[in-house]
Amino acid sequence: MFSDYAALIVLLPVIAFVLTLFLGKKLYSGGALLPIAAIAGSFIISFGTFLEIYPKDGIVQQSWPWFAGMNIGILIDPLAVVMLMMVSFVSLLIHIYAVGYMSHDHAKPRYFAETSLFTAAMLSVVLSDNILQFFISWELVGLCSFLLIGFWYHKPSAAAAAKKAFLVTRVGDVLFLTGIVLLYVNMSEIIAGRGFTVPEGNFILQFKTMFEAIPLINPTQLTYITLLFFGGAIGKSGQFPLHGWLPDAMEGPTTVSALIHAATMVTAGVYLVARTFPMFAATPSTLSAGVPDSLLIVAYVGGFTALFAATMGLVMNDIKRVLAYSTVSQLGYMMLALGTAGAVVGAQAVGISMFHLISHAFFKALLFLCAGSVIHAVGTNDIREMGGLFGKMKITGTTMFIAALALAGIGIPFINIGTAGFFSKDMIIEKAFEYGELKGDFIPYAFAIIAALLTSIYIFRLWFMAFTGKPRSERHSHESPGVMTRPLMILALFALFFGFAHLGFYDYLNKNFELMTGEKAAPEGESLQMSPIIVLLPVIVGVLGFLISYAIYHKKMLDMSKLVSSENPLYKLLLNRYYEPKIGADIIGVKLTHDVVAQSGEFVDRKIIDGLVIDNIIGNTLFKLGEFVRKLQTGVVQNYASVILLGLGLLIILLRIKFGGT
Amino acid sequence: MAALISLMIAIPLIGAIITFLTRTREQARFIALLASGISLVISLIIFSRFDSSISTIQFGESYPWIASLGVSLKFGLDGIGMPLVLLSNIVIPLTVIFAWGETKEANRFYGLILLELVGVLGVFTSLDFFVFYIFWEIVLIPMYFLINIWGGPRKDYAAIKFFIYTHVASLVMLLAIFSLYFNAWTISGTPSFDMFYLLKNYSVIESPLLKDAIFLALLFGFIVKMPAVPFHTWLPDAHVEAPTAGSVILAALLLKMGGYGLFRVILPLLPYSGSPAKLITLMAIIGVLSILYGTFLALAQRDLKKMVAYSSISHMGYVTLGAAALVPLSVSGAMYQQFSHGLITCVLFMSCGVIQHSAGTRIIGDLGGIAKHMPKLTFLMLAGFLASLGLPGMSGFIAEFLVLVNSYFTLPTFVILALFGIVFTAGYHLWAMQRAVFGTYNEKLGHIHDGANYEIASMGILILLIIFFGLNPNPVLNMMTTNAEQLLKFVVLRGVIT
Amino acid sequence: MSLYTYLLISAIIFAIGAYGIITQRSGIKILMCIELLLNSANLNLVAFSSFNGNATGQVFAIFSIAIAAAEAAIGFAILVALFRVRDTINLDDINILRW
Amino acid sequence: MNYNLLAPEIILTLLALVVIILGLLMRDVSKNMLGYVSAAGLLASIIYVLGNGMNTVGSFFYNSLTVDPLSQVFKLIFLIVSLIVVIASIEYFRDNRNQDEYYALLLLATVGMMVVASANDLVALFVGFELASMSTYVLAGFEKKNPSSLEAALKYFIIGSLSSALMLFGMSLVYGITGSTNIPAIIEFFKSNPMIATSSLDVVAMIFLVAGFGFKMALVPFHMWAPDTYEGSPSVVSSLLAAGSKKMGFVAAFRVLVLALVAIRIDIQMTFAILAIITMTYGNVVAISQRSIKRMLAYSSIAQAGYISLAFVVMTQMSIAGGVLLALGHALMKGGAFIAVALVGYMVLSDNRNAKNIDDLGNFAGLGKRAPITAFSLFVFFLALAGIPPSAGFVGKFVLFYSITIEAINQASSWLLIVVIIAILNSALSIYYYARVIKYMYVLPPNGEKIKEPAPYVVAILLAVIGTIGIGLYPEPFIQMAMNAAKVLGV
């Protein structure tokens, strides 16, 4: 019976948004309760739906016609339902946490209104059954992120970051939209030309219809479409080269970073690729044998981003920025999973990637909330000014340590005991290796494994610098209130134990596309046996990273000041984030677009088209002429007479020339 | 229930005359609101009775006028005119409400606004070319006064430039009308200015040269009004100098006359013109050029209002593009763009007006952080800006989506170019917001207050409408699509596009 | 004498009149030049009349002579009135109205 | 012979004499009523003309006068103009001791114009021309203490008599060639002997006639008297000149030139086109830089002359009709405008007895507040002159430009199209200086308080306004009228 009310999953938060926005001031605690209740409702319905459809491998499909052959609809299949539960659950926890975190902010109603709108939009992304609704919700999600990053709009940096986030993701969105345009055109053409028919009650842009049309669509077109979609994903999920906005997005409240820029929104890109995976998988393999082009590119972009972001994570001093880069890098892992695993085990890749997505959601949200709690207590973001916090903030410290373990993917192989990250990430790395084995291309694997090492180094660097040693600044700090710590503990539990659900999870997700399109995904070849070293390696690098950080930042065995100095070009490069902000914002944004193109356009418009042609050539000439001719009117009557006689003579001559006559 | 349309046109006219004669501003604005309100009600009645499934003229009326020239007062509505009539009747009352506080020569002010309503309603409903032209011209005069009496520092220049520039365009259009009229006359032997009749006989003209000449003359007449690059330069001046109400009417209604012309006149002729392929390309180029050019120039502006003016140019570019694409849904998308831009641009110009009025400047650089003191305005302005940059869920998105998606069938390259512009569209909107509204408050502005209630109210209503039509375009979109399909039957018939 | 002689003479008179109008300063002389023009036309008329052998021309001439007289009277009247207010009839000085 | 058809002229002539005699007998104070008398007479003859019907035909005095639709239309124009002028003059010349002469002359001028309108013989034409001209010479200089009025009169007189001399010369040549002064006979002759018809002597004759008529029409290069005279003479008289006697030139041109030129089949389209274009452009361009409104109106009426003379370029029935319509419209608009200026002058003088250049643009500031009716009427006249619908000006231009466009299409001649486009650009340009005055009237603040607008002026102006808008709103009968008038010429 829950599934009948699936629409409410989105509608409840929307209602909460409207009410909170307009009369939040009057409600208790700035109207925090309403959104919390609404999102709790969404979570319950999602969970109930899950319980309903899980046993009987069912899916929920509802859809209503909208305009011009488009529709609005709901599609809850395994892929969607797990996302639904995760999003609503994490969002719920973070809302509760926010009650404490935002307690001092006077604009609470706006905050809660926007977050609940965000939740609604995100849920709508997850359960939309057609690409257009997906895109629309996706844009609204972006809008909310824009609003929430700029929540403290009076901070210029916040306003700038909000704008940057929106614009950079906008680039991706335009690619996405172009993809939709291409898709729509191709669909209509095969409908017109190749006798493809949209079944009764289905609509042209529904995923179902799209997947059924795949075999008919021109392969190269399919590659374009999928790559354009992936462009959108790059924007949203902060993949290289559109990753720059995510670290800046940390200008928003930490809860926002946790909810939007770690747990949920940024994963929308991954979700998009997962959602349209069949199309990616169906693209022709021209670049590398047996690997669909789109997947290959997804894999490389993902892998590179994983490594690239991790390197910057090493040197950041803003606690939230470290986490932000770690998010980017982890998203890279998910993309990598979709690419490599997709190439070797097909649709199962979705399960692998999604599992990491969800476990990441738990421990990354946890990390951010811990960071939030630290910031809340210390009042600064700079880890160089922290230190020795563990004594004062036991809960935060412990939970954050757990989260760090999960992120680093620490666990015990072979007996399968470990944190969530252990299962999810190792699976990805193994698949990357398998991909290397089968396709003879180990680069993605190299990306993955190196990134794993760096990951564990920077996260433990962070933990050690923040929680151990002696305080590096005399800031009084205290443990956060219960309303904040309890969500931490809950998330910590998930970060620890969620991993054990992996097998069931994989099985469930593998059925995903069969359930929708009805056709069985071709069973992939048995995953080959791997030498233990390969299985061990991820854990080894994880532990290694821990030890390195321990050595450097706790025991201070070797002095970093040599390395960490503005002389060191590598360090500078990293610290300046590969000069991405400079290139992106300043050069392309301001210099090129505004100063060069726009201003020259302005010049042409005002000075040449308008100034020269309209005003000077036409206007002034006439005035001058008028002034001149006017002076011919001398007022002396003989001149008038002369003019008359002159004219007379001229006319006669003119006509005599014209026809001689006698 | 006949004569609804002429009633709808007559009431504002009477209202205008009464308003001119009133003594106090209270009376003036009350009567203005009353008259436009009644007109709105009538248009709503028409709208509710309108059958959006048929493409023929509905609520037609016809009265003899000048027999010897074959002129008669023909009015009527179809899916092309109806939405714009509705738009006009929505915009004008809201403008009156927005300008509720006008003190300078209030009776003239409101009277002129009503006259504008009369003019545009006449243009959108008249089906006789002669009458059409007369209304087309009449619209200029009140706008000239609105700019020249209530305008800014360079109002003289702007007003006269607007007047002459657009007047030249309409005279050129008149020449084309002459030729159509003469052509139809020679064929049938009886003079008639009936619009459809003239358009139908266009195909009979022998010389392709003459056909193209007529076509281009008409096109010129319309795209100057829209305005499209490179004939747009009157617009920024007019907008910058005009009072807020003037800008609102100018952008929301007068520009739409150009677009209306495209659908009512240009598209029926296009398939029969001398060289359709070339002309389509020409229109597409004009459209895309307007989109990109307008976008980049908006990016360069320092004056908020001027920026909005250029954004209008780029948005009207979508109309040209969609019309040129000659795909049913692209055409109806273009029509929808007219409708939605009419609503959105109101909000933008009203925001500019409120800021100007409260902060005393519109220069983006001199503003900053005004959100602190003007929360309500900020909320509405942000909503308007988002709508303008095509955020889904707002009417603008539907229009642009339809245009882009469907134009791709016939004009792929142009669509790609247009898509390229979208990023920058978002760019200048957000950049302006960031510098003018957000950030730290610029103390030099002194103490500023939020918009007055009536201003906020009218903007709020508009935002609600924008969202409503963004979520549920069907009420107007269906009738547009019906007519678009009917228009394009001939195009396909002629095999201009396959 | 042939018709052309008359025409020639009248042409000469016309030319003199025209020349005078262009060159003369005094209002009176201008009036006289105008009379010359009119009379050259009259000469034409009469000449043609006898050449064509019908009287219309002469009638016309008489009409025009009468009119010319009236015209002259009006002209003098205006000049006199002007002289009263401006103390001059030198047309070069009479140019308040210009441009 | 049915003298009813000539009754209007007769009435007016007698009335003129009566007025003179009454003037002799009356005391100065009571002379004001003469205005009403003449107005009544004009009204009577208007009624007579209408009573006779617009389409009646008749000829008099051995076919030297003819009555036909063309003459009727123009008679109507002249009569209406004179009526408006007379009504306005009641106020303008109130308590002037020479009113009797003024009205008598005005009536005679009207008679002269009407004679020209129906002249069917060169002699009659010449006589009518001279009658109208001489009366107006005097009227122009009627303020005999005012130097500029006298100067205007003098210039008008000299140029006028010069061009009438030219005209006479031309007529003498025509007579010489054709041996007749009766216009139909002349045309007949031309038709029958083309050899002579195309002789250069003939061309010369035609040019002389053009000069003669062009002087009245104020066609470049025969226009130069017009600005000075219109500016200098009393506003009411300027109104008469611009609205009335100008049209006399046109009707004469229609009667003689059109027919003759059609007959002698020499193509001087191009020549006329050039003349027309130069004239309209000249008028508009110079008008832009004027501050004296009367002078501006003068130049604008030169421009209008340019438009009307487009009718000669393509001598189709449509174009002639357009010319007639525009002439009619222009009579109303320009007449009304000058009267309005007169009222402004009255206003200025009531502020300050001895104000100089009273028609300066500055005096129009805030007129919308000071004299609402006048301002609104001027507003109407200006928009009408600019050709904005719905107005007489628009209808006239509409038909005229239409006819030429059609010719351009028919002859597939690009240069004709260019002519139209230039004409169109001109009428767009003219908006500039009209709008400037409108701006002064409605945008700028008034420099004085509201005045009471004298009834006679208001009546006169409103007559013109009603005519202007009326023709715009219901042009049907007028278009018919013009068409019939054009049909007479049988082109």
Image (cartoon, coloured by chain):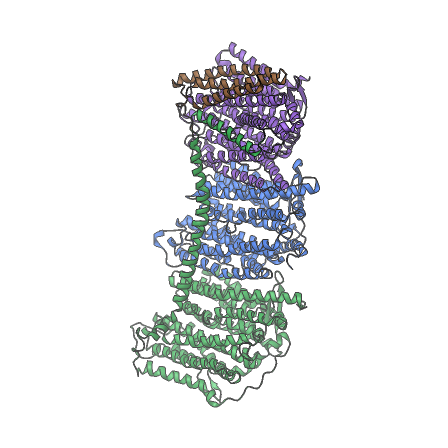
Chain colours: A green, B blue, C brown, D purple
- Measured as percent of width and height from the top left, residue D146 is found at 42, 20
Q: Based on the displayed image, in which of its 4 quarters is residue A199 positioned?
A: bottom right
- Measured as percent of width and height from the top left, residue A299 is found at 50, 77
From this viewpoint, which residue is outermost toward the right? B188
Camera-nearest residue between B307 and A440: A440
Question: Does residue C14 appear in the picture of this structure?
Answer: yes
From this viewpoint, which residue is outermost toward the front? C1
- Measured as percent of width and height from the top left, residue A519 is found at 64, 77
Camera-nearest residue between A532 and A634: A634
Question: What number of labels is visible?
Answer: 0
Question: Does residue D138 appear in the picture of this structure?
Answer: no
Quarter of the C terminus of chain B within the rendering: bottom right
Q: Is residue D415 above or below residue B491?
A: above
- Measured as percent of width and height from the top left, residue B27 is found at 51, 39
At a point 41% along the width and 30% down the height, the residue shown is D448
Q: Is residue A563 above or below residue B199?
A: below
Q: Is residue A650 above or below residue A291?
A: above
Camera-nearest residue between D456 and A33: D456
Camera-nearest residue between D220 and D248: D220
Quarter of the N terminus of chain B within the rendering: top right
Q: Based on the displayed image, in which of its 4 quarters is residue A506 positioned?
A: bottom right
